Amino acid sequence: MNKFLTIALMSFSAATWAQTNELVVSAFGGAYTNAIKAHIAEFERANDVRVKFVPGSGADALAKAKAKQVDVVHADVGWANRGEAQGVFEELEPAKIPNLATTFARARFSKYGVITNFGQYGIAYNPKLLKAAPTSWQDLLNPAFKGHVTTAGFDFANVELLVLFAKQNGGGEDNLEPGFKVMEKLGQNVSVFYSQHPQLLDLFRSEDVWLARWLRGRVDWANKEGGVDLKFVVPKEGAIGLASTVHVVKGTKNKALAMAFVNYLLSKNSQTQYAVALGYTPARADLDPKTLGENVPYGEVVVNSLLISDWKKLAPNMDQIKETWEKRVVH
């Protein structure tokens, strides 16, 4: 009798394990996903779920969402607006995501998504090669630095820079032409547009690059990796904001779990991990700054100072903006 009972219990246990829910999350790869994974077991135990991360960003992430291949999507503000316009996301339910109430007002992206963390794009530079620290985004255009300046290829942060230059010259989100005229000058100073963070680190190590548009957290990472001693400055016009959003995919069969996962991302533990691991400013407004690390800017003043454009105007025109960028800025 005991033998049969043991076998039955083993079978029941195996069946229960096999029925454990799986939540599929599309997230930015590498360090970003690793920062979430570091303590994801806490969420998995509490919700009897296994979280499966799949790399995805931009068009790829939205394609996975439309095909119902994922339950949760991370995005930047440009693709977040595209997803909303295309009806890809569920409305967030505040009753199921009580941590929404703990976030900075600017983090409440829309009823379809929330910003989980903010990054600062500024100017990274090698103090050994520059006589004076850069003070403005205009310094990237200085002819004295020709061939030793870089920025990433076409990405949302370059669109933010494009908008900034447009606004400085009488334009804006609705009129980018003045910005493109300035960006053409920037393109003439760039010998290579970097695509990966390790690539830019190597360019700084070889001293081919003297200054670049880069993330504050990545400058800290580069210095820890070794071979460089870079400095980071927020230009007088302000830091370009990197805002990472999270969304529940419309029609997911795991809607309740997906809402719970969003709530977890806004928990104190998860928010602190973003800061410690990535150098990003948390979206949660009630954290102790002492727990975030000395190089992590924090607070409502920091969040509200970030340069973030009106992406509801920009997102529908991204294909055209990219085409113009490739023709006029990249040489």
Image (cartoon, grey):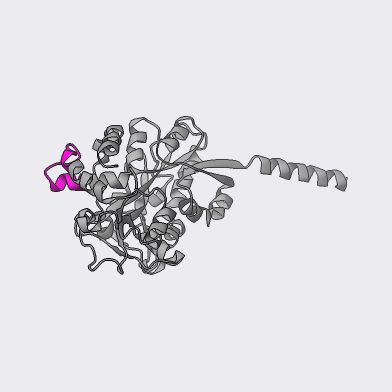
Query: Where are the magenta residues, as a range?
Result: 163-178
Q: Quadrant of residue 324?
A: top left
Instruction: Please identify the quadrant where the C terminus is shown.
Output: top left
Residue 186 in sight from this viewpoint: yes
Q: Name, please, the residue furthest toward the left.
A: 170
Is 93 drawn above or below residue 119 in the view shown? above
Q: Quadrant of residue 315?
A: top left
Report the residue at 24% width, 48% height from top. Answer: 188
Which of these two is toward me, 24 or 295? 295
**Does residue 157 show up magenta in the picture?**
no
Against 227, residue 22 (above or below) is above
The answer to whether residue 111 is visible is: no
Q: Position of residue 245 (x, y in %)?
A: 38, 45
Return the x and y of residue 166 as percentages of the image width and height.
17, 44
Marks counted in the figure total 0
Quadrant of the rendering where the N terminus is positioned: top right
Residue at 24% x, 39% y is 328
**Residue 156: which quarter of the image?**
top left
Q: Residue 50: give x, y in percent of width and height.
A: 58, 46
Q: Residue 177 in the image: x percent, y percent? A: 17, 38
Q: Is residue 87 left or right of residue 255?
A: left
Give above or below for 221 relative to 51.
below
